[in-house]
Structures are given as C-alpha cells and as structure tokens.
Image (cartoon, rainbow, N blue to C red):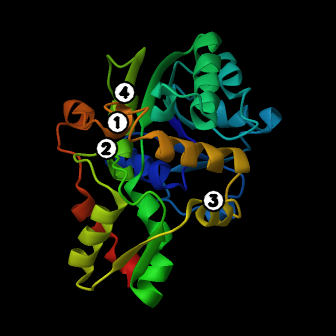
Amino acid sequence: MILVTGATGNVGRQVVEDLYKGGHQVRVLTRNPAKVSFPAEVEVAVGDLTAPQTLKKAFDGIQSVYFIRVPGSEAFPKIAKASGVEHIVFLSSSAVELPVENAIGRNHFNTEELIRQSGLKWTFLRPGAFMSNALRWAGTIRTESVVRAPFGDVGTTPIDPRDIANVASKVLVSKGHEGEIYTLTGPELLTPIEQVKILSNVLGKDIRFEHLPEDIAKETMKRFAPSEIVETLFQISRDTPTVVLNTVLNTVLNTVLNITGHQPRTFEQWAADNAGAFQ
C-alpha cells in the first residue's frame, strides 16, 4: 500500500488519482478528513506531519510514501523507517541545485539529508516553477484584463503539476528509481510576459502585462508567504539573468518524457485546461 501526504495539493491530488486509476492501494494522510473527497476505495488516515505521535497508524501496512515537506515534519522519515516503510518519494525543489544559497533550497536539502540518514530507500523529485503559479493572476485577469508582476522578462521552464504527479506515481510503483534524483522541467522556456500572451490567446481576450515594482510586489507576497521564502524567490528571479544563467532554472530537460513516456504538457495546454479559473 502507498501513503500519500499533501493529498489535497496540486500534485498530491493527481498522485492519488494516478495510483487509484492504476489499481493500486492508496491511503491519504490528512489532519481534517471532513475536507477530503476521494473514491471510497482510497483509505483516509487522520494524522499531522508535524505531530509524530499521530502518524503510527497511518504507516500500518505501508511500503511506499509520497512525501511533501512542511515546517515541523523533520521526524517523518525516521518514523517511516521505524514503521516498516521501504521507499520514500520526496517532492523536493530544483532550488537545491542553484549556485546561490537560498532558503527554499536549504530547507529542501535539509529534508533530503534527513531522508538519506533515515536508511530508507529514496527518490527525490526536484521541479522548478509550477505552471499553476499563474493562478495568482486570475483575479486581475477577470476584473481588469491585466497582469501586474515583477521580472516580466525573466525566463523559467514552468511545469504542469500533473506531470510532476505522473512522474511521482510512476516512481512509486516501479523498480529502478531508488537513489535517483530527478530534476523536472516543462517543455519550454517562458517569461511571465510570454505566459500572459499565451493566456490572452487561450482566453480570447487582450490581457496587458504591467511591470510591478519589486518592493511593492514583495510586500504584497509577504501577506501570504513567509518573509524568508519571499526574499528567496525575489533573489532567485533577480539573479537569474546573470548568476544562474544556463542552470536548472532555464534549461529544458527530458526527465518527464524519459520516466512517463509522454511529453510534458505545454503552458498552452495547462491554460486551456484551467481557463475557467481566469473567466
């Protein structure tokens, strides 16, 4: 049986769907079972990643785990090993690979080290920017047909969360991935300005891009995310054209194709599939 943490997130929910459709036994971990909705065949275990004493029942009969990091979940790998888990697939971040020290990379690398030290067999997935990050523009697109953002000309290789989930699901149920680190990207290098142009075409409406001053954008983001993480995101974006040129941030890789057998979805495909969120 496979345990999925973060099962209500963009990636986790798709992991559950992939595994369920593939005929695999799945259990999800949640703090609030009233907020989850899965097929009856998917088991629901109540537990908290930050409260080790709540996890033991969730591990009963589990061979493999899909794991996401949250602050306070440092004990999870050790408990998983002690509970008989054999393999953990960890959703890390490509920020680990950047040549500049940053909080996102540091936090995920520390978790990778805890997993290594636990004695579990492991596989690390390191995606970069998610295509679903564009959903933060939905409000102003709906009301003003405008996107206001900093770093409009900085390119990344955004990936559809479904592709990350497809890779995770494949790795969870097949052999030969233990001890591997998979860096995941989308199929193309895109700037925010280019993403907005694609959204305009898909939605059939003229959407303007307005450059937002960095200080204003930073303060706005700090309302919803920890200050350390916000500072890191802006540092990475600011340094991309120089310090991290030709690194994981802006290099297209074939990892999704190599593992799943299908090409990674384009931003245009993602936009068409999520058009309703912008209308």
Which of the marked residues, 3 or 4, is nearer the chain's N terminus?
4
Crowding near the residue tagged with mark 3, few <14, some 14–19, many ≥20 C-alpha atoms within 10 Å: some
Task: Give residue 218's mark.
Answer: 3
Which of the marked residues, 1 or 2, is nearer the chain's N terminus?
2
- Give the CA separation, mark 3 to mark 1: 27 Å
Which of the marked residues, 3 or 1, is nearer the chain's N terminus?
1
Where is mark 1, residue-wise?
Answer: 184
SS type, badge 2: loop
**Which callout, 4 or 2, points to the residue nearer the camera?**
4
Picture quadrant where residue 225 is located: bottom right
Q: Are marks 4 and 1 in contact (CB under 8 Å)?
A: yes
Q: Residue at x 56, y 43 (%)?
A: 235
Where is mark 2, residue-wise?
Answer: 22
SS type, badge 1: strand
Task: Give residue 182's mark.
Answer: 4
On the rendered structure, is 249 left or right of 258? right
